[in-house]
Amino acid sequence: MEAFPDYDPATAEMAMARQEGSGLPGFLGIRTVAAGAGTMRCSIDVRPELLNPFGTMHGGVVSALVDHVLGAVCYPVIPRGTWAATTEFKLNLVAPVREGTVEAAAEIVTMSKRTAIVRIDVSNGGRAVAFAQGTVTLKPPA
């Protein structure tokens, strides 16, 4: 793992303390489980309203979890006031989810002043259910 000279433990702690978010993460029930220098884990409980008609978690919910952690992992390591925006990501859904908790573990693979590449492993009960990699655009304060 590379060094992150702008790592701010207070920002990581703030991500951990803010368990009841607003917007889509709040609606879906996404929780931050752990946050550190270039790493973050978020989870979501499987609930009936998040399932598709076939009884498995909708791929859009997994995608939203991935998108959330993809950008959020950057905030503790970028200069305060910088905006992190998902540019793109590829998601491979490899197994169905029917119950329990889904956890997304993100790690910044590399980061420059303008972009970050992040890998995300998604699991359910210790079983891999998805893999993703994405690019985040970092926009410094004006």
Image (cartoon, grey):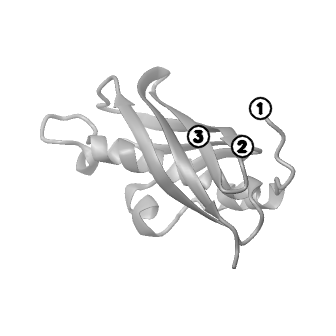
Callout 1, which amino acid? Answer: Met
Label whose residue precedes the other's in the sequence (2 or 3): 2
Label whose residue precedes the other's in the sequence (1 or 2): 1
Callout 2, which amino acid? Answer: Gly
Give the labeled residue for mark 3. 118
Residue under the image location 69 percent in, 68 percent down: 140
- Measured along the vertical axis of the image, is residue 8 above or below residue 94? below
Name the outermost residue toward the top. 127
Residue under the image location 76 percent in, 68 percent down: 80
Residue under the image location 44 percent in, 48 percent down: 88
Any mark on residue 1, and which?
A: 1
Residue 85 horizontal/vertical position (percent): 53, 60
CA gap, disc 2 to disc 3? 9 Å
Name the outermost residue toward the right. 5
Callout 3, which amino acid? Answer: Val
Residue 42 or residue 64, whichever sits in front = 64
Residue 63 horizontal/vertical position (percent): 37, 45
Residue 40 lies in quadrant: top right
- Measured along the vertical axis of the image, is residue 37 above or below residue 20? above
Name the outermost residue toward the left. 53
Give the labeled residue for mark 2. 38
Query: Position of 59 compared to 117: left or right?
Result: left
User: Dot 1: within a 10 Å radius of its alpha carbon, few (fewer than 14), some, or many (20 or more) residues?
Assistant: few
- Measured along the vertical axis of the image, is residue 53 above or below residue 26? above
Name the secondary structure under disc 3. Answer: strand
Label whose residue precedes the other's in the sequence (3 or 1): 1
